[in-house]
Image (cartoon, helix red, strand yellow):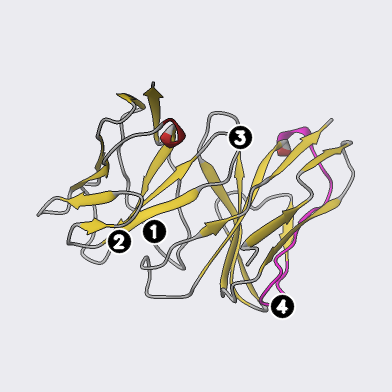
């Protein structure tokens, strides 16, 4: 049971490049989400999904796109990378239990540097 | 999410119990109290959660005040591996989590 798998672990982009951060979970969780964590800060929610075909914006969605075509995968796309998007990105998943009564599982993160 | 307040940092010695406090005075009646921790260079890790009653699991205990305006995460015997940032969170809406800065726990041998 792999849990939540994120790829790549590290990435360096040039300003203006685009890329996709991959996230996959094998626990059949309906809820998935993306967070970013800047140095010395807590995690901030970028986008989330409550099931295949359903996504919504979080606290800091600008510059990112998501889609959810399967239960297992929730990729995060950077449309035109900017230095302000240098951060560590975490993907999480959880069951769709009663609000707040489920635990979230996190991936190990993708460390992205935009130069 | 309802706001939580935690100390910036705490220190402990190895093998001693640790009590990590969290204030959440604006908690609503249906808000669960969650604790996560983040070890250096890793993703957050679920620790424990509860609603009204005290909870125990293999990692920790959660003591919830009777008025639910505060809670305490208890690590019964701290180890060096418990050195991490601990987040107290009250999830809302599709189990999305709002992370504050948490409490950095330092454990000395």
In the rendered image, residue B63, in percent from the top left (x then y), is placed at: 19, 50
Same chain check for tags 2 and 3: no
For the residue pair B46 and A58, the one nearer the viewer reads as B46
Disc 2 packing (10 Å; few <14; some 14–19; many ≥20) = many
Say which residue label 1 marks: B91
- B62 sits to left or right of A25: left
Q: CA distance from mark 1 to mark 2?
A: 7 Å
Q: Chain of mark 2?
A: B
Say which residue label 3 marks: A38
- Mark 4 or 3: in front is 4
Q: Chain of mark 1?
A: B
Disc 3 packing (10 Å; few <14; some 14–19; many ≥20) = some
Residue B101 visible in the displayed image: no
Q: Is residue A26 above or below residue A39?
A: below
Quadrant of the drawing holding the N terminus of chain B: bottom left
Secondary structure under tag 1 reads loop
- B49 sits to left or right of B101: left
Q: CA distance from mark 2 to mark 4?
A: 29 Å
In the rendered image, residue A20, in percent from the top left (x then y), is placed at: 81, 55
Could you say which quadrant of the image residue A75 lies in? bottom right
Q: Which residues are magenta?
A: A67-84
Q: CA distance from mark 1 to mark 3?
A: 21 Å
């Amino acid at each position: 049971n792999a849990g939540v798998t994120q790829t790549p672990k590290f990435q360096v982009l040039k300003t203006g490049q685009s890329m996709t951060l991959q996230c996959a979970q094998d626990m059949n969780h309906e809820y998935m989400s993306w967070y970013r964590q800047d140095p010395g800060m807590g995690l901030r929610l970028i986008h989330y999904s409550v099931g295949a075909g359903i996504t919504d914006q979080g606290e800091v969605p600008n510059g990112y796109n998501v889609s959810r075509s399967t239960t297992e995968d929730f990729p995060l796309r950077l449309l035109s990378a900017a230095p302000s998007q240098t951060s560590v990105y975490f993907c999480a998943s959880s069951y769709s239990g009663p609000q707040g009564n489920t635990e979230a599982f996190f991936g190990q993160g993708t460390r992205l540097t935009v130069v | 999410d309802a706001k939580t307040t935690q100390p910036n940092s705490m220190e402990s010695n190895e093998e001693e119990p640790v009590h990590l406090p969290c204030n959440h005075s604006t908690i609503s009646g249906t808000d669960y109290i969650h604790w996560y921790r983040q070890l250096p260079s890793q993703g957050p890790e679920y620790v424990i959660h509860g609603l009204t009653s005290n909870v125990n699991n293999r990692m920790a205990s959660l003591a919830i005040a009777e008025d639910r305006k505060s809670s305490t995460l208890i690590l019964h015997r701290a180890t060096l591996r418990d050195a991490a940032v601990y987040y107290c969170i009250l999830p809302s809406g599709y189990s999305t989590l709002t992370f504050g800065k948490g409490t950095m726990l330092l454990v000395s041998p």
